[in-house]
Amino acid sequence: MKVKVNLGCGKNAIEGWINIDNSPKVILSKYPLLRWILFKLKIISKEVYEGIWSRNIIWHDVRKGLPFETESVEVVYRSHLLEHLTRDEAKVLCFEVFRS
């Protein structure tokens, strides 16, 4: 069965899709105690502390390739992602998307 993938999803996780983002906030959302400790130590801001991200987001750097078998992905959505990459990184990602 082919999957649907939302790359660089930010807080916008789509139900039924594989949502991927590289933000450290993805990790913090999975560890509320760590988030609280970092907030109390003034390492993260109140905005970051209170900004809850969906737990169904996978933390992954797309510049290192996509974690999918060849031709295993049906749809890739990547709104507001390419502008965060260099031209070469974006080009490689586009080839990787078509591989998947």
Image: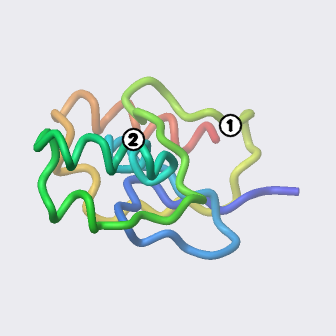
Hey, which quadrant is residue 69 in on the image?
top right
Left or right of 94 on screen, residue 66: right
**100 horizontally vs 3: left or right:** left
Give amino acid for label 2: Leu
User: 24 or 72: which is nearer to us?
Assistant: 24
Say what amino acid the circle numbered 1 marks. Phe
- The residue nearer to you, when weighing 67 against 97, is 67
- What residue did someone put label 1 on? 68
Q: Residue furthest right?
A: 1
Residue occupying the far top of the picture = 64
Look at mark 2 in the image and give the residue it sits on: 34
Q: Secondary structure at mark 2?
A: helix
Work out whether residue 45 or residue 75 is closer to the camera in this orientation and state it: 45
The residue shown at (39%, 46%) is 28
CA–CA distance in space, label 1 to label 2: 30 Å
Is 94 on the left-hand or right-hand side of 55?
Answer: left
> In this rendering, is residue 89 above or below 1?
above
The image shows residue 78, relative to residue 31, as above or below, that is: below
Question: Horizontal and vertical percent for residue 31?
Answer: 48, 46
Q: Which of the image's four quarters has the N terminus? A: bottom right
